Image: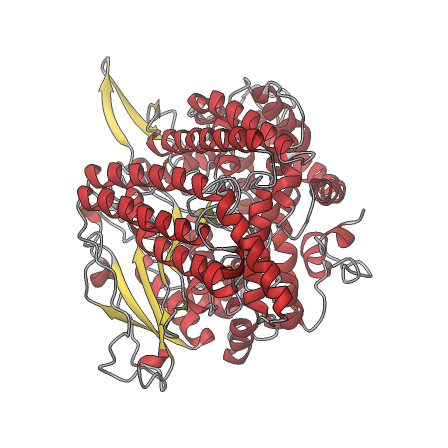
Amino acid sequence: MSLAARTGPPRLRHLTHKRTVLGLSTVAVGLAAAHYAGPLTNLAGCRSIAGYGRLREVTPFLWNGPRLSSRAFSSSPSSLLSLTPSLSKLFKFDTASSSQSVMPGLTPPQPAPKWSHTAEDITRLTKEAIEHDRELQDRIAKLKPEECTFESVFLALAEGEAKFDAITEPLSFYQNVSASKELRDASNEAEVLVRDFGVESSMRLDVFETKLAAEKNIKASGRKLNAEEQRLVDKMILEGKRAGLALPEKERDELKALKKELSQVCLEFSKNFNEENGVVSFTLEELKGVPADVVSGYTKRTENGKELYDITHKTPDIFPLFKYAENPETRRRAHESYDDRLAINVPLLDRALELRRKCAALLRYKTWADFVTEVKMIKSGKGIEDFLNDLEQKLRPLGVKEREILLGLKQAEHKAKNLPFDGEFYIWDYRYYDRKFIEESLALDDSLVKEYFPVSVVVPTILEIYQNLLGVRFEEVKGETWHPDVQMFAVWENGAKDENGFVGYCYLDLFPRASKYSHAAVWPLLPGYQRADGKRSYPLAAMVANLAKPTPDRPALMRHDDVVTFFHEMGHVFHGLLSRTQFARFHGTSVARDFVEAPSQMLENWCWEPRVLEKMSSHFETKQPLSADLIDKIVKSRYVNVGLFYLRQLFFAKFDLKVHTDQDATDYTALWNNLRTAISLVKGGKQGPGQGSFGHIVGGYDAGYYGYTYSLVFAADMYATVFKKDPLDPKLGQRYRDSILQPGGSREELDSLKEFLGRLPNSDAFTKELFGNAPSGGVGASL
C-alpha cells in the first residue's frame, strides 16, 4: 500500500493511564532526535509498560542525522556548574513590552507546589496516596448494581486518579532532578510502589464490574452524556477489557504476575541506562580534528606516563568525536565502546520481550504490536508494516545515491592521507563525512553557526516567539523549586485582568549538574481539569534540559540542532499548558502516541524560516544576527542526506516492530546488527549489543517507534496548510490553540486535524519535503 494511503487511518494512549492495561507510571515521549550510533534514549525510565499516568514529553536521542528532524541536546555530568551562571542572571524576560501584558499584582488562583520534601515525606505521602486511592476503589466496588451511575463510578474514579497523580507525579519527579541521592532513591522506590499499585488497580475485577453496571444503567436511563464524558466511559471500559478482566481467574492471576515482572524488568533496564558512566580514552593525537573547546571539557589523566582524555558516552562528549575525529580508528573504537555500553541490559530486554509475548497470548492478540496499536491511529501491526515498507521503498534509491557520494568523499580523503580504503562505508563514517559533505557543498561550518546562538539570547527569544504566537505571557515567580538554578514562571493569557486569565505554571531547569536527568525532557507534572466543585485545577509543566556549557573564553552556545530541539520541547510545554479539558486523563499530550509528536514536530519548522533565524541569532561577540548567506546555507542543509537519515529511522522502527511481532525469541544482537546493515546502508564492525541502549522499547514506545516518522506526516501537513504563509501570525496561533492544543485527548485526533486543516489530512506535504514533489491523491478516504 502506498505511503499516501497508509499515513492517514491509522504517537499515544489514547494515552495510557494508570488504570489502563499493562502498567503504570507516567509515559515518556518526545522528539525523534536521531542519533547515529544507536538509539540512546531513556524515555524517562521505563514508564508505561502500557500505561499509568500522563504523558511525559522526552527527547529520545537516536541519531544525529540530517536536518529534517532535529537533534537532542544534553550535557556531560563531568564538568558542571562552576562556569554556569544562574538562570536569573542569564535570562531577562521582558514581559512589559507587550501592549497586552498582564495586569500587575495578579496572584495565581492556585499556589505553586512545594519542593521541600524529605525522603521520609516522599515515602509516606506515596503510601498515603495509594491507600486513599485503594479505599476509593474499595468503596466503588461495594456499590450495588442499581447504585452504579456516571457520578458514583466514572466521575469518582476520574477525580480519584487526578488527585492521586497530583500527589505522586511530583514525588516521582525528584529522581530526575534532585541533587540529593537520598531523595532520588526515595523517589525511585516510591515509583516502584506506584507501579505495583497500578498493576493491582488495573486487575480489579470488582471495580470493572461496577463500570459495566454503570454503563448499562446510563444507557437504560436514556441519559445523554457530553462528548468528553462519553469518551471517559468508553476508555475506562476498554481499559478493563485490555487489562484482561474478561479472562478466567487463573489467567487473570497469571497475567497480573507477568505484568508485575515486566514492570520490574523495565525499571531495572532504565536504572542501568541512567547510571551508565563508562568512558573511552584517547590521546590528544588520536583526537585530532575534534574542536579544542570540546577537548577542553574532557577529563584528562596520566597513565603510564601518557596523557589520556576520558570521553563519556554522553551526547555532547562523544558525538563531536564521531563528527570531527579525523582518525577512522578513533571513531571505530569510540563507536564500539558506545555500542557495548549497556550490554548489561541485553538479558533484560530478552526477558521483557518474552513477557510481552506471553501477555499478548493471554489477552488473545496475535502479537504485542497488535495489542499496542489497538488504541493508536494506525490500529494494527500490519498497518505499521505497510507504512514502513512503503517508505523504505521510496527512500532506498535516495539513500543509495547519498551513500555513494559520501563513500566517494571517504575514498578521496583516504587516498590523500595514504590511509587504507576497503570500499566500505561504516557506521562510524556517517557523521564525519556527512559534516564534510555539508562543509564542502554548502561551505557551512557548524562551529561558526554555533557562535550566533548564545543560550542567553536563544532561550528568551524562543519564549517571546511562543508568547506572541499563542497569546500568553510568562511572569517570573520567585518561589520554592527543587534547585537554585531552576526558574519558575506563572503563565497568563495576554491582557489578563483577573485570576480567570491564569493558565498554569512552567519551570525551566536548563543547565547540567551531577546526577540530573542527562537529556532534554518535559514533565507535565500536573494536568489541568475541572474539579468537582466546578473550579479548575491548573497545569504545571517542567522542562529539564542540559544546555551547552560555557568555556573560559566563550559563553554557553547552542548548535542549530539544539535550537531546533529547544523549540520542539517548548512545543510540548505549551501543549501541556494550553489544553483545557474536563478530565485530567485527557489533558494536553494525552493523545494517541503516533500523533503526540506532530504538534512539536510542526513547530520545528519555525527554526528553518529565515526571518525567525534572524530574530533568534546574535553573534556572541559582534551581536550581529546571522547573515542572509548563512541563513540560506542553513536552510539548504536541512534535507542533505535525508535518505540515509530516514533509512536509519526505519531501521529502528523495523527492529522494534519485528521483535514485537515475532512469535519466538532470537539472537537479538545479531538481529540488531544485521538489520542495521541491511536497512540503513552502513556497515558495522564487530557485532555489539546496541539493543541494550534502545530504551524506547521498554519506555513506552514498544511497537511505537514508527510513530516518530508517522507523526511527521501530520506535522508537515499542518505547517504547509496553515502556518507556512505566515508562521508568526497570532491569528493562526489562536487557530492552533483552539483546534489542536485545547482539546488534548478529549476527542479523536483525526477530528482535531480535520478542524485545524479544514479537511482530512494527507501525506502530500511530507512527500514533497522528502522527495521534492507531491503525489496526486491523498489519504482522506482511508482516514
Q: Nearer the viewer, residue 327 or 131?
A: 131
The answer to whether 121 appears left or right of 521 in the picture is: left
Q: How is the image coloured?
A: secondary structure
The answer to whether 6 appears left or right of 424 in the picture is: right
Q: Looking at the image, is 450 positioned above or below residue 354?
A: below
| Picture quadrant where residue 458 is located | bottom left
Disc tally is: 0
**Residue occupying image coordinates x 17% and y 45%:** 118
| Picture quadrant where residue 184 is located | top left
- List x then y, in percent, for residue 682: 62, 30
Q: Quadrant of the C terminus?
A: bottom right
Q: Looking at the image, is 736 positioned above or below residue 133?
A: below
- List x then y, in percent, for residue 417: 52, 25
The answer to whether 730 appears left or right of 275 in the picture is: right
Mark yes or no: residue 776 visible: yes
The residue at the far top in this view is 304
| Picture quadrant where residue 242 is located | top right
Mark yes or no: residue 637 visible: no
Q: Nearer the viewer, residue 84 or 38?
A: 38
- List x then y, in percent, for residue 435: 52, 42
**Residue occupying image coordinates x 43% and y 71%:** 465
- List x then y, in percent, for residue 39: 51, 36
**Residue occupying image coordinates x 34% and y 56%:** 166
